[in-house]
Amino acid sequence: MKNTKKVLDKLLLKYKAQPVGSSYIDIIVSRLNYQKFIKEILENKYKIRAISWWEYIPDIDTPNTYGMCGPTSKFYDGKFAEAPYQIDDIEETKTDKDIINLIENKVLCEYHNEIISFKNTQSLTPAIWLDVDKKWKSRDLFR
């Protein structure tokens, strides 16, 4: 399959992956879908360049714990709050298994004497940064 914008947009909808802005960086993908999403993104020859981190809060009226502000989810009840920590750069040679391993072993920080990690913190959610044509915009995806 060719890595076109149309194919990418279909993958985002299929896996309920939500870009935060109008481009294809910070594509928040749920813990339920991230493995299949990453695998299919790479199978379709898109390049993953980084992973950033978000807190998922199932109730929009609940305050953020360790994240800052962010968007309401387009696919789920609740909202996201950006975790103000490092972005993990991904080398072009990394496989889907390498990227999934990075996500699953992520330790973000210590917050109020609690280790915030992917394994221990169910609200910690990855966001995928893709290297695609700068002219491509995701803003029309949810209109």
Image (cartoon, grey):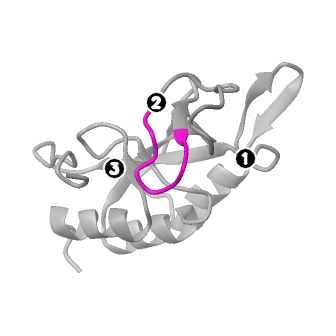
At a point 17% along the width and 61% down the height, the residue shown is 5
For mark 3, give the secondary structure.
strand
Q: Is residue 110 above or below residue 2?
A: above
Front position in the image: 57 or 127: 57
Per the model, the C-alpha gap separating discs 3 and 1 is: 21 Å
Q: Is residue 94 left or right of residue 22?
A: right
Task: Provide the residue designation for mark 2.
Answer: 70
Residue type beneath disc 1:
Phe
Q: Which mark is residue 130?
A: 3
Q: Which mark is residue 16?
A: none
Task: Provide the residue designation for mark 1.
Answer: 118
At a point 77% along the width and 34% down the height, the residue shown is 116
Q: Is residue 41 left or right of residue 86?
A: left
| Image position, residue 94 (x, y; %) | 50, 58
Q: Which quarter of the rendering shows the N terminus?
A: bottom left
For mark 2, give the secondary structure.
loop
At label 3, counting other C-alpha atoms closer than 10 Å, the crowd grade (few under 14, some 14-19, many 20 or more) is some
Mark 3 vs mark 1, foreground winner is 1
